[in-house]
Image (cartoon, helix red, strand yellow):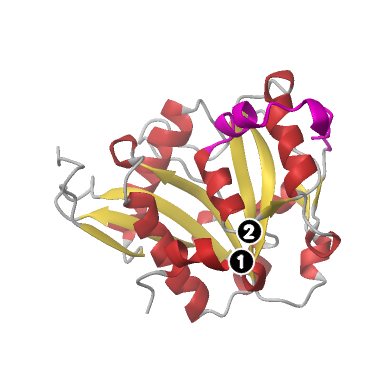
């Protein structure tokens, strides 16, 4: 196996079926084997995590060129614009969240999903490389609003009361971006005055914290996804309001 301390990264859109199959295998390793997820289209025999929406998405992949073909994808993001969502019949997360406020905005939307990294590449520069590729995509397509679900592992709401309440009290979207969970699970579970903020932040997944640092916010209410064994929140980010200081990391090296 490649030493992840000295990877040779290339971040780009998937070019062929080999790239896509490698991405689906990575998703299976993370979302099914690691996190216990499942779904009607998951191929357990082939070890592929997939669904009916994959054909409509663009797939951003992070490749370590030092790894063997077929095992070369170490990071994934799938992204879908409004025209692709029209062909699919909806955005993926519309099963979980009412996006009417975003659809009515007449702004250029991009849904993000299935973000994951190989376990050997977490905590280093891999996510930065993947985000730089996302930054290029956003700039190339003049995207104005990014959104998508991000997940806490598990469905025990009592165990997640502190971080969910922190998101509700400190990071709720403005009304013009405030999507709402369709099967509503309140995130207003603990009064702000009694939240242990340091612990709540430690209990918040790294991807969610990264979006918050960039100026992202969350929709109203969580969604419990029993199939994937997760509790989901909908993250929304207006690129015009992105925190300028922290956006430098996201946009650095984007042409």
In 3D space, how far apart are the residues under numbered discs 2 and 1 (Cα atoms)? 5 Å
Count residues near mark 1 (Cα–Cα under 10 Å), then give few for <14, some for 14-19, many for 20+: some
Name which residue lies at 51% across and 55% down: 54
136 drawn magenta: no
Mark 2 and mark 1 in contact? Answer it, CB < 8 Å. yes
Count residues near mark 2 (Cα–Cα under 10 Å), then give few for <14, some for 14-19, many for 20+: many
Q: Is residue 166 left or right of residue 229?
A: right
Q: Is residue 251 left or right of residue 68?
A: right
Q: Earlier in the sequence, mark 2 or mark 1?
A: 2
What is the magenta range?
184-205
Front residue of 36/39: it is 36
Where's residue 246, x and y in %? Answer: 51, 61
Where's residue 41, x and y in %? Answer: 53, 40
Where's residue 14, x and y in %? Answer: 35, 63
Q: Residue 153: which quarter of the image?
A: top right
Q: Which residue is mark 2?
A: 215
Name which residue lies at 52% across and 45% down: 207
One can see residue 178 in this view? yes
Q: Up-down: is 195 above or below 98? A: above
Q: Residue 110: which quarter of the image?
A: bottom right
Q: Which residue is mark 1?
A: 242
Locate the C terminus by quadrant: bottom left
Locate the N terminus by quadrant: top left
188 drawn magenta: yes
One can see residue 225 in this view? no
- Disc 2 is placed on an element classified as loop
Where's residue 35, x and y in %? Answer: 49, 28
Q: Residue 90: which quarter of the image?
A: bottom right
- Disc 1 is placed on an element classified as loop
Q: Up-down: is 190 above or below 24? A: above
């Amino acid at each position: 196996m490649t030493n992840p301390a000295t990877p040779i990264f290339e971040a780009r859109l998937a070019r062929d079926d080999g790239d896509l199959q490698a991405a689906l295998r990575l998703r299976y390793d993370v979302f099914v084997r690691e996190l216990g997820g499942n779904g009607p289209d998951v191929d357990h025999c082939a070890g592929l995590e997939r669904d009916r929406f994959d054909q409509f998405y663009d797939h951003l992949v992070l490749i370590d060129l030092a790894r063997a073909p077929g095992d070369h994808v170490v990071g994934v993001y799938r992204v879908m614009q409004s025209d692709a969502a029209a062909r699919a019949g909806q955005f993926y997360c519309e099963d979980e969240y009412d996006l009417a406020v975003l659809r009515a905005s007449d702004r250029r939307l991009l849904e993000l999903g299935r973000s994951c990294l190989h376990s050997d590449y977490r905590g280093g520069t891999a996510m930065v490389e993947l985000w730089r590729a996302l930054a290029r995509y956003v700039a190339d397509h003049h995207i104005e609003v990014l959104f998508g679900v991000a997940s806490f592992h598990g469905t025990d709401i009592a165990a997640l009361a502190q971080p969910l309440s922190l998101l509700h009290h400190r990071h709720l979207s403005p009304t013009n971006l405030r999507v709402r969970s369709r099967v509503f699970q309140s995130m207003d579970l603990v009064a702000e005055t009694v939240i242990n903020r340091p612990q709540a932040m430690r209990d918040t997944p790294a991807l969610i914290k990264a979006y918050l640092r960039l100026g992202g916010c969350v929709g109203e209410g969580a969604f419990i996804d029993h199939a994937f064994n997760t509790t989901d929140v909908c993250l929304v980010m207006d690129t015009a309001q992105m925190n300028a200081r922290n956006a430098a990391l996201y946009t650095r090296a984007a042409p």
